[in-house]
């Protein structure tokens, strides 16, 4: 129910976020929630509903989403707008000529970053610092370093996973069934940003997707020459194990993980991986003011 929560609650971390959302909305900012269907997303959207403000929520399917996630969104979040992809993941792999990697995640750019909210909107995400080491430096208000018109508001940036689940449980917020199967994240099947162990777990759970990756790797090799990959099985082996080993080696040497593709013109930067972060600012407008005066 929109606007029904009594404030403050839960110490006051829920109430504070709701008030902050309302304050940003009062400033006339168009708030656009990037929705994934994951636990952080459903809590974020619930908070926006409780704030009782106007907002839009958008979802960008990647064509390798768990079918259960798509069913969940269709069933419980009919108000979410879908940004349909221009190309599927497997056609994209064949077109690019190499699998996506942690350092060259062209799929994120194609499926997610290309579909960011419009420039006059503030992109609101469920990013949390405690999700991973990489996110530890993320902040509540951020501006894209490459484009000051793209701004972010991450309302639950400092929440713990426990806080997220407490809000879900206490308020009976529906969540995707894969969490009850032991999956702790809801994302693309076979995502290179996860560990080898996670990719294997996902391929066992969704074997048709593993087959589809295998076929994509097979077609990807057609007409191309690679020293280390002769067959689809070579690519699959590297995709699951090789890339992770390489990142660990580079980490151990303190070298930033530029993988082999960086020298051949195929490396693509991830602009959203380089936001300019602002802490202790009251809202996105403050963040922009600081940025423009820098
Ligand atoms: S989340 Fe992973 S698989 Fe999905 S688009 Fe981003 S890098 Fe690619």
Image (tube, helix red, strand yellow):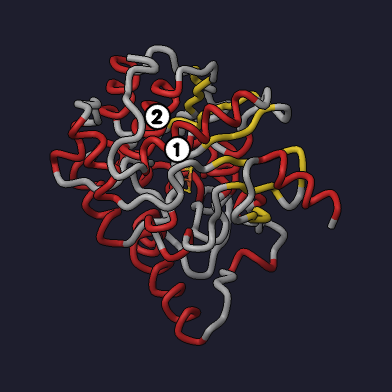
When asked about the image quadrant of residue 129, the answer is bottom left
Residue bearing mark 2 = 47
Where disc 2 sits, the SS reads helix
Work out which quarter of the rendered image holds the C terminus and state it: bottom right
* Disc 1 packing (10 Å; few <14; some 14–19; many ≥20): some
Give the camera-side residue of 116 and 124.
Answer: 124
Residue 4 badge:
none
Secondary structure, mark 1, is helix
The vertical placement of 268 against 8, above or below, is below
Of residue 34 and residue 268, the one placed in the foreground of this image is 34
Nearer the observer: mark 2 or 1; the answer is 1
Q: Is mark 1 within 8 Å of ligand 1?
A: no
- Mark 2 vs 1: CB contact within 8 A: yes
Q: Does residue 249 show up?
A: yes
Residue that numbered label 1 is attached to: 17
Q: Position of residue 131 (x, y in %)?
A: 38, 55
User: Residue at position x 52%, y 35% from top?
Assistant: 20
- Residue at 50 percent across and 23 percent down: it is 57
**Is 208 situated above or below 291?**
above
Question: Whole-Å distance between the Cαs marked 2 and 1?
Answer: 8 Å
């Amino acid at each position: 129910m929109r606007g029904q929560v009594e404030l403050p609650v839960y110490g006051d971390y829920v109430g504070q976020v709701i008030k902050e959302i309302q304050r940003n909305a009062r400033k006339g900012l168009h708030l656009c929630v990037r929705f994934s269907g994951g636990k952080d997303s459903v809590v974020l959207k619930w908070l926006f509903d409780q704030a009782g403000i106007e907002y839009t929520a958008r979802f960008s399917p990647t064509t390798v989403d768990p079918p259960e996630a798509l069913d969940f969104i269709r069933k419980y979040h009919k108000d979410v707008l879908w940004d349909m992809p221009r190309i599927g993941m497997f056609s994209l792999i064949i077109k690019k000529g190499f699998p996506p990697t942690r350092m060259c995640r062209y799929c994120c750019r194609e499926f997610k970053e290309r579909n960011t909210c419009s420039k006059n909107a503030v992109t609101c995400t469920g990013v949390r610092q405690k999700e991973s080491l990489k996110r530890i430096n993320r902040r509540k208000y951020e501006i894209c370093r490459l484009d000051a018109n793209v701004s972010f508001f991450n309302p639950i940036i400092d929440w713990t996973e426990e806080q997220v689940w407490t809000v879900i449980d206490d308020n009976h917020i529906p969540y995707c069934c894969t969490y009850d199967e032991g999956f702790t994240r809801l994302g693309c099947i076979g995502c290179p940003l996860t560990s080898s162990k996670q990719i294997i777990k996902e391929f066992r759970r969704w074997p048709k997707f593993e087959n589809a990756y295998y076929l994509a790797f097979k077609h990807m090799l057609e007409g191309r020459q690679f020293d280390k990959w002769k067959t689809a099985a070579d690519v699959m082996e590297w995709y699951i194990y090789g890339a992770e080993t390489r990142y660990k080696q580079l980490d151990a040497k303190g070298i930033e993980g530029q993988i082999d593709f960086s020298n051949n013109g195929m490396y693509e930067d991830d602009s959203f991986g380089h936001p300019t972060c602002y802490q202790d600012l009251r809202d996105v407008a403050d963040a922009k003011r600081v940025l423009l005066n820098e």
